[in-house]
């Protein structure tokens, strides 16, 4: 009886050590580079849009649990007026929410493109940096009433967090013309 039980058990369980097929990834591809120097933050932002990877995008922003400051965003004056209270309490989580909302409106197989035409270091210290940039963000989303390209100029203040990785702690979107659709506008449109 015991022998019969053992034989039956080994025949039923003989495949327990075989490998199973891998599960498909749940997150898009990742090309995140640890930001050991300030300019890598901008490379990571560009890659996050190309990969449509919100987790990597979020890593570019200061978190008060790992950095001396929390992230803040200052939209263009036009966007502040147009979108009312949307920007009153803008935070790191707001950045993630807008990115996720934008990603949900980009058809499968398409990708956004972020280009910093100019990226100039205004100040570089051992633990802080300031950059000025002009940008073009092209997002082939499916909302007909919203422009697919945002252009503008921004000032970025960065700091080294406790792990010595660089993050953005303040982003000031600078108006370049009353008729241009800025990154602030794109954030305002996809904030909710």
Image: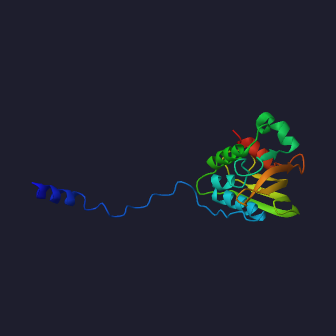
Q: Which is more toward the observer, 38 or 185?
A: 38
Residue at image point 76% right, 65% down: 37
Residue 59: x %, y % from top left: 68, 54
Total number of numbered labels? 0
Q: Which is more toward the observer, 55 or 4?
A: 4
Color style of the picture: rainbow
Residue 164: x %, y % from top left: 73, 61
Q: Establish if 24 lies above or below 101.
A: below
Residue at image point 61% right, 61% down: 30
Q: Which is more toward the observer, 90 or 161?
A: 161
Q: Establish if 1 lies above or below 118.
A: above
Asked where in the image residue 126 lies, by quadrant, the reply is bottom right
Asked where in the image residue 38 lies, by quadrant, the reply is bottom right
* Left or right of residue 75: residue 66: left
Q: In which quadrant is the C terminus drawn?
A: top right
The single residue placed furthest to the left in the displayed view is 1
Asked where in the image residue 127 lies, by quadrant, the reply is bottom right
Residue 51: x %, y % from top left: 63, 59
Residue 132: x %, y % from top left: 86, 58
The single residue placed furthest to the top in the displayed view is 85
Residue at image point 85% right, 62% down: 125
* Left or right of residue 176: residue 9: left
Q: In which quadrant is the N terminus drawn?
A: bottom left
Residue at image point 77% right, 50% down: 68
């Amino acid at each position: 009886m015991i022998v019969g039980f053992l034989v039956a058990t080994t025949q039923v369980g003989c495949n327990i050590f075989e490998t199973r097929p891998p599960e498909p990834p749940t997150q898009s591809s990742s090309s995140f580079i640890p930001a050991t120097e300030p300019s890598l933050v901008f490379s990571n932002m560009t890659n996050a849009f190309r990969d449509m990877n919100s987790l990597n995008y979020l890593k570019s922003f200061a978190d008060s649990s790992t950095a001396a400051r929390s992230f803040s965003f200052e939209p263009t004056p036009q966007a502040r007026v147009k979108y009312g209270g949307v920007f009153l309490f803008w935070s790191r989580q707001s950045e993630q929410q807008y990115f996720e909302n934008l990603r949900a409106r980009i058809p499968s197989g398409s990708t956004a493109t972020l280009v910093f035409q100019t990226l100039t270091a205004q100040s570089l210290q051992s633990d802080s940096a300031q950059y000025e940039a002009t940008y073009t963000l092209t997002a082939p989303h499916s909302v007909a009433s919203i422009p697919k390209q945002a252009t503008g100029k921004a000032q970025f203040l960065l700091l080294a967090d406790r792990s010595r990785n660089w993050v953005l702690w303040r982003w000031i979107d600078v108006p370049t013309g009353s008729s241009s659709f800025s990154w602030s506008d794109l954030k305002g449109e996809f904030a909710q």
